[in-house]
Structures are given as structure tokens and as C-alpha cells.
């Protein structure tokens, strides 16, 4: 009995991070709140094809290219804060807005938009679980009307600390480094950042075809099996900060302290003095 107790006491203790349930809304919740004046629904995608074919009533379209720029040869970087402020105000986002993001073909654009608003300090933001596909599977109403939108008033409260820099990644003291790419990319010819662990961003979904997130328990087991535990901060990366945005969202949802290496592997490879690991 004493030996068993001593064994338990010597095991590493993981923090019991609480899930942030307000970051994810169901289709049922959204359907019940579409007419709320403070709710702003954004359809985020690479192009308007899905939106024009039929979108959630009242939603406004935003192309992912509108909140991404190429900087110093690195694609998919955050634009200047004034440009982001102008964009989201044009979409009707104000300080009091409850912003709901959804995607139509992949969760990536919605997750990247979430990270962008998180960076701006707008905390009343959530992602629609399952995206437009889940909405359609439930035969909920669609619209082809483009709403007339009054401009919002958004006050940026920038959280620059959410963006990890190359110098931090070079010396990963006190945090775990998560590569959100596929196992093939992680172990392939180009390699990965030394010391990083690998969990493919898409493994957090029910399936490749179903954007609904797995259960909280399944998600925790997925990351903890790779050594990504909630007792340490996490920095996520991929090739250019897009796939890693999904991992950023998922880990924050689980209650992890998480940052995004926005330049990701593209910037790492361009930076003198960096090395890669292959296995």
C-alpha cells in the first residue's frame, strides 16, 4: 500500500486545464442566435464559391487573403494592425460583437481568422463546430442574399505575445514545440525544427470530411500521447502558419497556454544559423 502511494506521488502531475467552451458553438446555438443584434457571423474561405452557392443567413463573406500578407518572402503573415482593424470594422465587428466564424471546405481559414482576432484582443470570438458542412447536414436554412452591413467600431488590444519569434524557437526553454504538419512532411526530406513533436492538425477533427472537433477527452489523449501536456506552454508551427492555426485554436480550447510561430518552417529555413532534424 505504501509503495503504491509512493509511486503515485512520484508520477509527474499534469495541470488540469479547463476547456474554454465559449470558443466553440454548435449549429443549434447559432440557429437560435442568428437574429441577435450583437452576433456577427463571418463565412471565411479562400474564395466566394461556397458563400455564393448558399451561406448561413446573415453571414458576411471574408476571404482569407484579406487578413494575410507576404512579408520578407514569407507568406501568410499578419497584416498591420490598422489594416486588420479596418477590415473587421467593415464587416460590422465592434468591441461588443460576439463573432462566430465558420468555413466551408476546411477549418483552416476559420481557425486562422480566430487567431487573427485573438491577436487583436477580441475575446468574444468562437468557431462554428463542423462549419458549413455540418449546417448543411442538418438541413438548416441557407441564403444567397448578401446582407447590408453597418460598419463596426473595433478597438484593437494587441496581444503581441501570442506570436512566437524565431529567436524564441531557437531556444525552446519552458515550452513544447508542436509541428502541425502531416507525418510525411515532419519526417520527410525537408525535416522539422529540432525538438518539436508532431500532431497533424487534421487529427483533431472527427474525419477529413467532417470538420467537427473530436471530444475533449479524445483531443487531450491525442496531444498528451505526443508529449504535448498542459503543464507546459506550447508553440505551434507548420509551413506558413495556416495549419498551425487549427492546432492553436484546438489547444487554446483545451485550456493550454499556446502561441503561434507565424513564420513557421518557411521562416526557419530562411534564417541563418538554424538547423533541421530528420527522422
Image (cartoon, rainbow, N blue to C red):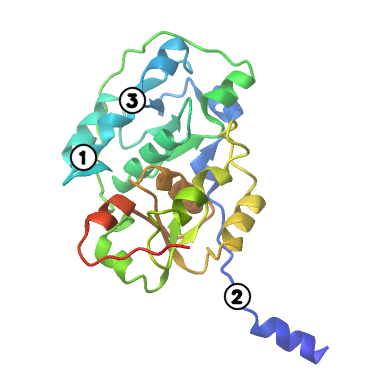
Q: Is residue 9 above or below residue 261?
A: below
Q: Residue at horizontal 49%, vertical 22%?
A: 34
Please, what secondary structure does the residue beneath circle 2 have?
loop
* Residue at x-position 53% and y-position 64%: 230
- 3 or 1: tag closer to the N-terminus: 3
Q: Is residue 185 left or right of residue 88?
A: right
Residue closest to the far right: 1
Residue that badge 1 annotates? 70
The CA span between labels 1 and 2 is 42 Å
Residue 275, placed above or below residue 208:
below
The disc, 1 or 2, on the residue closer to the chain's N-terminal end is 2
Residues 4 and 76: in front is 76
Task: From the top left corner, tell me how far across and down residue 167 is, in percent.
Answer: 25, 66
Mark closest to the chain's N terminus, 2 or 3: 2
SS state under label 3: strand
Q: Which residue corresponds to mark 2? A: 13
* Mark 3 or mark 1, whichever is nearer to me: 1
Question: Could you say which disc has been placed on residue 62 in the image?
Answer: 3
Quarter occupied by residue 234 = bottom left
| Residue 64 in sight here | yes
Res. 120 image quadrant? top left
Q: CA distance from mark 2 to mark 3?
A: 43 Å
Mark 1 element type: strand
> What percent of the width, then of the height, locates residue 196?
44, 63
Mark 3 touches mark 1? (CB < 8 Å):
no
* Image location of residue 95, percent across then percent down: 31, 37
C-alpha span from label 3 to label 1 = 18 Å
Q: Are marks 2 and 3 in contact (CB under 8 Å)?
A: no
Q: Residue at x 56, y 24 (%)?
A: 133
Mark number for residue 9? Answer: none
Q: Nearer the viewer, mark 1 or mark 2?
A: 1
- Label 2, residues with CA under 10 Å away: few <14, some 14-19, many ≥20: few
Amino acid at each position: 500500500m505504501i509503495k503504491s502511494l509512493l509511486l503515485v506521488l512520484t508520477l509527474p502531475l499534469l495541470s488540469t486545464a479547463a476547456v474554454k467552451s465559449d470558443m466553440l458553438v454548435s449549429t443549434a446555438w447559432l440557429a437560435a442566435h442568428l437574429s441577435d443584434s450583437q452576433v456577427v457571423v463571418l463565412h471565411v474561405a479562400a474564395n466566394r464559391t461556397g458563400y455564393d452557392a448558399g451561406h448561413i443567413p446573415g453571414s458576411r463573406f471574408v476571404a482569407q487573403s484579406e487578413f494575410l500578407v507576404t512579408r520578407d518572402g514569407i507568406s501568410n503573415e499578419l497584416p498591420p494592425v490598422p489594416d486588420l482593424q479596418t477590415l473587421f470594422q467593415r464587416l460590422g465587428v465592434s468591441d461588443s460583437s460576439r463573432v462566430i466564424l465558420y468555413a466551408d471546405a476546411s477549418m483552416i481559414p476559420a481557425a486562422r481568422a480566430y487567431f487573427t482576432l485573438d491577436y487583436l484582443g477580441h475575446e468574444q470570438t468562437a468557431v462554428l463546430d463542423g462549419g458549413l458542412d455540418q449546417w448543411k447536414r442538418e438541413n438548416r436554412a441557407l441564403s444567397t442574399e448578401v446582407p447590408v452591413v453597418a460598419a463596426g467600431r473595433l478597438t484593437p488590444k494587441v496581444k503581441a505575445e501570442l506570436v512566437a519569434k524565431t529567436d524564441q524557437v531557437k531556444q525552446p526553454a519552458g515550452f513544447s514545440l508542436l509541428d502541425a504538419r502531416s507525418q510525411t512532411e515532419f519526417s520527410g526530406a525537408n525535416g522539422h525544427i529540432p525538438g518539436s513533436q508532431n500532431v497533424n492538425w487534421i487529427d483533431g477533427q472527427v474525419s477529413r470530411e467532417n470538420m467537427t472537433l473530436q471530444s475533449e477527452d479524445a483531443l487531450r489523449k491525442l496531444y498528451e500521447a505526443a508529449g504535448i501536456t498542459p503543464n507546459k506552454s506550447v508553440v505551434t508551427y507548420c509551413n506558413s502558419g495556416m495549419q498551425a492555426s487549427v492546432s492553436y485554436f484546438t489547444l487554446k480550447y483545451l485550456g493550454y497556454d499556446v502561441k503561434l510561430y507565424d513564420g513557421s518552417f518557411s521562416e526557419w529555413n530562411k534564417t541563418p544559423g538554424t538547423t533541421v532534424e530528420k527522422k
